[in-house]
Image: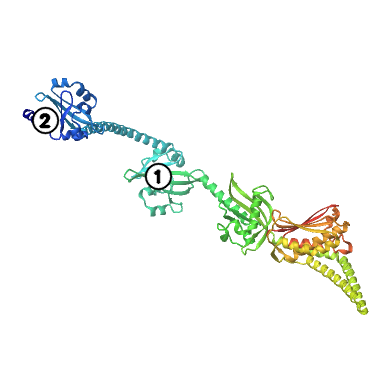
């Protein structure tokens, strides 16, 4: 027993001695490959706990050829006695670790000792040195190739630059830092008549352009002397280039170049090296002779066109693509009252139009009522003057297109105020002439009314003498009836012959028609005529003169009832209908339809002329002319349609504005 314990102690001491190897990982394994002991460095390198590696096959910790040797060739290693190799061990995390392994057979202990050292850093350094050498070799080769190619490219560029300079159709020359000409191309030869042979190497760059020696743009751009440049190139439109940095531009007419002189545009720019130091300058010339002539002609045409626009008797207003007024001539100024400064570039069409007029003009431009889409021909409308008063005009215009895109518009306006004044005077003269022609008829009508008055007065006197109250009332009714007739004819003549502007107020057309129907209902009943109204559309309130439109509707309804009576219809056949609706473009339309006898063509042609009447002595012929005048004073229309035997319809239309 004591012998076994002593042997164990000796073995542990031996293993401890064998495992001492500094920081290297050391393990002992037997001839069968089973690990019997290892130090902490060995276990730490593999990531295992120290006790877990005992009895573990040593070959399982290695990869590739080392694994095969340790598994099947341990007997050979006994004979060999000692081996060192670089291989990879597999740690607990299954990641390969490069190591240098030394395996030795210890005969006295019948054990193998393996010492491993982590050579990860060494491997990385070796790899870095290898790859660095490869990269360096590649880079040196590439840099050498690039340098060679750069030299070739530089030569090509130099050749190309000289080729471009000499072959360019643009006249140009180059000077060096000493102001000597180094390049003078063929285009310069053609422009100036001086050859490259006589110019290169000299400082005579002034000679083709000026009569005596002086600095040219190339010299000035090199010296960077703006004050001297301004002095030498005064009147030549000298300026800094907006395209080329540090370059100067100038324009001038040289009368001695070419058969009729040449207008040149010159650009001079400095030539700098990589350090930014000026080494020379290059000058190019462009022949602007034709361009200058075209610009002069364009300016003349523009001035001529502007003169035509400004002196046109029509007002001309044009807008740009943003809708702003860009052209506004003197006639437009006279019509509207705005100065060009107040309106050009500041206002739009909408600023000189009422909302309703703007909508009507927009619809007209994109519709075909006043011409093809995009055009308006002779539209009568109104614009708003500076005092915001409506000014009647004849409006003609067109939208301007660039392909399919609208880029503006132009309109022509004619002031209709004087024309309308003359038209009113003409209408007044015609009305007075018509009144003069029919004075006899009216006088006869009044004579009959006066006879009725006398008859009524006689009845009143006789009734008073007899003390008969009923007879007195009957006579007085005769007097009142005839007085009403005299008042009616007098009012009609005053309206027809006079000038009176409508006093507008916003009224409900439906309420107005209801009042007319209520007033005329009894008269229609007594005449055996059915009187009805139809309100087909909500119109809202409309601006109108209440007295004038009420009187007009009363007259139309009275005429319609009379038309049914004159036909001799039996009760139930005669009918008068008043219809209220709102057609496109109008604020309201009143239609008065009767089922009377209708009118033939001759009657229709005379309907509004010479106090024409179909009622014999019962009518004056003033009703319809007075009605039409009151409607037209509103800017409205009075239309009619009649078919013999089928009745008549009168339409009274009032405008939106």
Please provide percent x and percent y for residue 67: 22, 25
Please provide percent x and percent y for residue 537: 71, 55
Q: How many callouts does the rendering have?
A: 2
* Direction front: furthest residue: 1
Residue 205's disc is: 1
Question: In which image quadrant can residue 501 be found?
Answer: bottom right
Q: Tag 1's secondary structure?
A: loop
Left or right: residue 236 versus residue 374 is left
Give the residue pinned by disc 2: 15
Res 282 seen here? yes
What colour scheme governs how the chains and residues are painted in the rendered image of this protein?
Answer: rainbow
Left or right: residue 313 versus residue 137 is right
Q: Residue at x 57, y 61 (%)?
A: 342
**Mark 2 residue crowding within 10 angstroms, few (<14) / some (14–19) / many (20+):** many
Question: In which image quadrant can residue 130 be found?
Answer: top left
Left or right: residue 80 versus residue 632 is left
Please provide percent x and percent y for residue 290: 52, 45
Image marks 1 and 2: residues in contact by CB distance under 8 Å: no
Left or right: residue 30 versus residue 555 is left
Q: Nearer the viewer, residue 601 or 67?
A: 67
Res 206 seen here? no
Q: Nearer the viewer, residue 359 or 297?
A: 359
């Amino acid at each position: 027993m004591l012998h076994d314990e002593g042997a164990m102690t000796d073995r542990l001491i031996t293993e401890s001695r064998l495992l001492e190897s500094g920081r290297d990982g050391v393990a002992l394994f037997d001839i069968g490959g089973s690990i019997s002991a290892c130090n902490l460095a060995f276990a730490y390198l593999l990531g295992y706990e120290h006790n877990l590696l005992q009895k573990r096959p040593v070959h399982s910790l290695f990869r590739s050829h080392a694994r095969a040797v340790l598994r099947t060739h341990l007997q050979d290693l006994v004979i060999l006695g000692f081996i060192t190799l670089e291989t990879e061990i597999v740690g607990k995390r299954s990641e390969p670790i490069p190591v240098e392994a030394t395996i030795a057979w210890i005969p006295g202990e019948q054990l193998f000792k393996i010492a491993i050292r982590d050579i990860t850093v060494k491997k990385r350094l070796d790899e870095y040195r290898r790859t660095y050498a490869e990269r360096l070799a590649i880079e040196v080769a590439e840099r050498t190739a690039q340098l060679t190619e750069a030299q070739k490219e530089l030569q090509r560029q130099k050749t190309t630059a000289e080729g471009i300079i000499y072959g360019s159709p643009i006249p140009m020359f180059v000077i060096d830092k000493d102001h000597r000409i180094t390049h003078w191309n063929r285009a310069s030869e053609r422009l100036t008549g001086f050859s490259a042979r006589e110019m290169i190497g000299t400082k005579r760059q002034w000679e083709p352009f000026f009569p005596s020696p002086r600095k040219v743009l190339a010299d000035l751009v090199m010296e960077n002397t703006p004050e001297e440049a301004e002095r030498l190139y005064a009147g030549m439109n000298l300026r800094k280039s907006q395209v080329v940095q540090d370059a100067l531009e100038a324009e001038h007419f040289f009368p001695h170049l070419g058969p009729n002189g040449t207008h040149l545009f010159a650009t001079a720019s400095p030539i700098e090296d990589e350090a930014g130091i000026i080494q020379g300058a290059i000058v190019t010339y462009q022949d602007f002779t034709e361009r200058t002539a075209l610009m002069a002609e364009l300016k003349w045409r523009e001035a001529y066109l502007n003169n035509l626009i400004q002196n046109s008797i029509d007002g001309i207003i044009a807008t740009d693509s943003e809708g702003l007024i860009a052209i506004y001539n003197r006639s437009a100024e006279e019509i509207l009252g705005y100065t060009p400064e107040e309106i050009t570039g500041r206002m739009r069409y909408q600023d000189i139009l009422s909302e309703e007029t703007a909508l009507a003009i927009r619809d007209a431009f994109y519709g075909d009522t006043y011409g093809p889409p995009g055009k308006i021909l002779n539209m009568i409308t109104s614009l708003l003057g500076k005092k915001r008063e409506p000014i009647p005009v004849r409006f003609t215009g067109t939208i301007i297109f660039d392909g399919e895109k609208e880029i503006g518009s132009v309109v022509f306006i004619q002031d209709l105020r004087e024309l309308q004044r003359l038209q009113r005077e003409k209408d007044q003269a015609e009305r007075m002439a018509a009144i003069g022609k029919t004075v006899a008829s009216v006088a006869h009508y009044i004579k009959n009314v006066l006879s009725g008055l006398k008859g009524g007065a006689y009845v009143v006197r006789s009734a008073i003498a007899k003390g008969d109250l009923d007879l007195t009332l009957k006579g007085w009714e005769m007097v009142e009836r005839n007085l009403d007739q005299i008042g009616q004819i007098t009012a009609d003549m005053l309206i027809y012959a006079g000038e009176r502007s409508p006093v507008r107020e916003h009224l409900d057309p439906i309420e107005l028609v209801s009042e007319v129907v209520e007033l005329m209902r009894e008269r229609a009943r007594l005449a055996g005529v059915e009187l009805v109204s139809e309100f087909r559309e909500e119109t809202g309130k409309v601006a109108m003169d209440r007295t004038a439109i009420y009187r007009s509707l009363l007259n139309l309804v009275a005429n319609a009832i009379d038309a049914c009576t004159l036909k001799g219809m039996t009760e139930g056949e005669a009918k008068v209908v008043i219809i209220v609706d709102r057609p496109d473009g109008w604020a309201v339309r009143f239609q008065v339809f009767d089922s009377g006898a209708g009118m033939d063509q001759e009657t229709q042609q005379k309907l509004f002329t010479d106090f024409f009447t179909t009622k014999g002595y019962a009518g004056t012929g003033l009703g319809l002319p007075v009605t039409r005048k009151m409607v037209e004073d509103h800017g409205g229309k009075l239309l009619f349609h009649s078919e013999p035997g089928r009745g008549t319809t009168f339409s009274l239309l009032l405008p939106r504005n």
